[in-house]
């Protein structure tokens, strides 16, 4: 292998209907990701495979895997680029684990997570300072490590049948703890 040969840091499979969003108008989104992450995205529109080729900082190249996955899981690319901050993380929860194949349970779960007019998702996002995307058979969370963990816990409570009000109360009670832990993380 030659020294200047590009390295493929990984392949991310995203739904074909999300390829156009990843590319963006006239390729603008793809170019933005490539510039920020110092990578080249090689997109196979037929399979949905996106190879990520490193052209700079290896850490940025690895972080770009999450950016591409986040776009594939329904986040808009501008929010997904937030994952280039190494303090942010992406958590993807498969809803298939909570429902039998072919059952209507996944749609019921998605409805509970989103809530009427998106209210439940919005409240959890506000209380935890995270972003949540319900897409396909998954729910995904983007945020700093501490916030994402609380967001994940609240979503799992909803998936397991807890009432929305009890989840909101849980998060409201944890709000001070979340804030304190974030400050502690920042200032050590």
Image (tube, grey):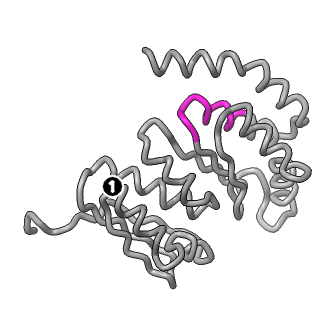
Q: Is residue 145 magenta?
A: yes
Residue 71 left/right relative to 93: left
Q: Residues within 10 Å of mark 1 (few under 14, many from 20)?
A: many
Count the marks: how many?
Answer: 1
Q: Residue at x 88, y 28 (%)?
A: 166
Give residue 161's position: percent from left, percent from top.
87, 40
Q: Residue at x 48, y 56 (%)?
A: 67
Q: Is residue 17 magenta?
A: no
Instruction: Please identify the quarter of the rendering in which residue 129 is found.
Output: top right
Instruction: Please identify the quarter of the rendering in which residue 167 is found.
Output: top right
* Quarter of the image that includes the N terminus: bottom left
Residue 13 left/right relative to 142: left
Give residue 107's position: percent from left, percent from top.
84, 60
Query: What secondary structure characterizes most of the magenta part?
Result: helix
Name the residue that disc number 1 marks: 61
Residue 56 left/right relative to 16: left
Q: Which residues are magenta?
A: 143-153
* Quarter of the image that includes the C terminus: top left
Say what secondary structure mark 1 lies in: helix
Q: Residue at x 47, y 53 (%)?
A: 66
Identify which residue, 67 or 111, lies in the foreground. Answer: 67
Q: In this view, which residue lies farthest toward the left?
A: 2
Identify which residue, 71 or 157, lies in the foreground. Answer: 71
């Amino acid at each position: 292998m030659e020294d200047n040969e590009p390295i493929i840091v990984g392949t991310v499979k995203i739904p074909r209907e999300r390829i156009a969003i990843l590319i963006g108008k006239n390729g603008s989104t793809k170019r933005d990701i490539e510039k920020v992450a110092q990578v080249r995205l090689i997109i196979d529109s037929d399979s949905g495979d996106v190879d990520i080729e490193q052209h700079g900082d290896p850490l940025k190249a690895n972080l770009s895997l999450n950016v591409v996955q986040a776009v594939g899981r329904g986040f808009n690319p501008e929010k997904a680029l937030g994952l280039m901050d190494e303090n942010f993380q992406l958590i993807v929860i498969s809803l298939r684990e909570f429902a039998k194949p072919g059952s209507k349970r996944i749609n019921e779960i998605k409805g509970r997570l989103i809530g009427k007019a998106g209210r439940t998702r919005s409240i959890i996002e506000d209380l935890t300072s995270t972003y949540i995307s319900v897409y396909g058979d998954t729910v995904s969370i983007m945020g700093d490590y501490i916030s994402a963990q609380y967001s994940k816990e609240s979503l799992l409570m909803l998936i397991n049948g807890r009432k929305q009000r009890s989840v909101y109360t849980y998060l409201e009670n944890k709000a001070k703890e979340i804030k304190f832990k974030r400050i502690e993380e920042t200032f050590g």
